[in-house]
Image (spheres, rainbow, N blue to C red):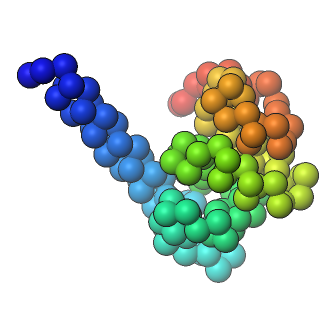
Amino acid sequence: MTRPVICLTLLLATVALRADTLKDASNWPDLVYSAKQRGIDYPATVARARHGDVATLAILFRHTPHTDGSGADSHCVVLRQLLEMLGDRKFSSTLRHETASLRSKVTEALDFDFDHAWQKQFPLTYALGSHDTRLLEPHNET
């Protein structure tokens, strides 16, 4: 195979894996259950947010404080994946409209999933909240 074909194949595989990860995370049973308790169809909301619906992105932001355990872990994955898909400008412009407290909860959820400094990749979003440096270190999954 030629180099461009190999690069294109790897890119398509990465995009497919990312989509699968977002779909899997948005269907995590504990997360779906906690959202359902608040009247949110989590998988459908994520699907709309993924396609740029900022109103549904805001719903996901507002669900952040209501997650815990494995549902919170999955929600962190969803937020990071959406940030990567939608881009820093769109994600941050939506998050900017939320309260300072909620913005910090979202940025700390992102800290947890990135588990490394991410301010250079997404400076607009990073600047909107506080950060717990302990979350920016790799964590052991047991």
Q: Residue at x 65, y 53 (%)?
A: 90
Q: Is residue 46 above or below residue 19?
A: below
Q: Is residue 106 above or below residue 53?
A: above
Residue 91 percent across, percent down from the top left:
66, 52
Going by the image, does 130 lie left or right of 117? right
Q: Residue at x 81, y 54 (%)?
A: 96
Residue lying at the far right in this picture: please name it. 100
Residue 123 percent across, percent down from the top left:
73, 33
Going by the image, does 61 lie left or right of 36? right
Q: Quadrant of the N terminus?
A: top left
Question: Closer to the camera, 114 or 86?
Answer: 86
Question: Closer to the camera, 69 or 118?
Answer: 118
Question: Closer to the camera, 67 or 131?
Answer: 131
In this view of the protein, can residue 73 be seen by the observer?
no
Q: Residue at x 75, y 40 (%)?
A: 124
In this view of the protein, can residue 25 be seen by the observer?
yes
Question: Splitting the image into 4 quarters, where does residue 12 fall?
Answer: top left
Residue lying at the far bottom in this picture: please name it. 39
Residue 93 percent across, percent down from the top left:
74, 54
Going by the image, does 25 lie left or right of 56? left
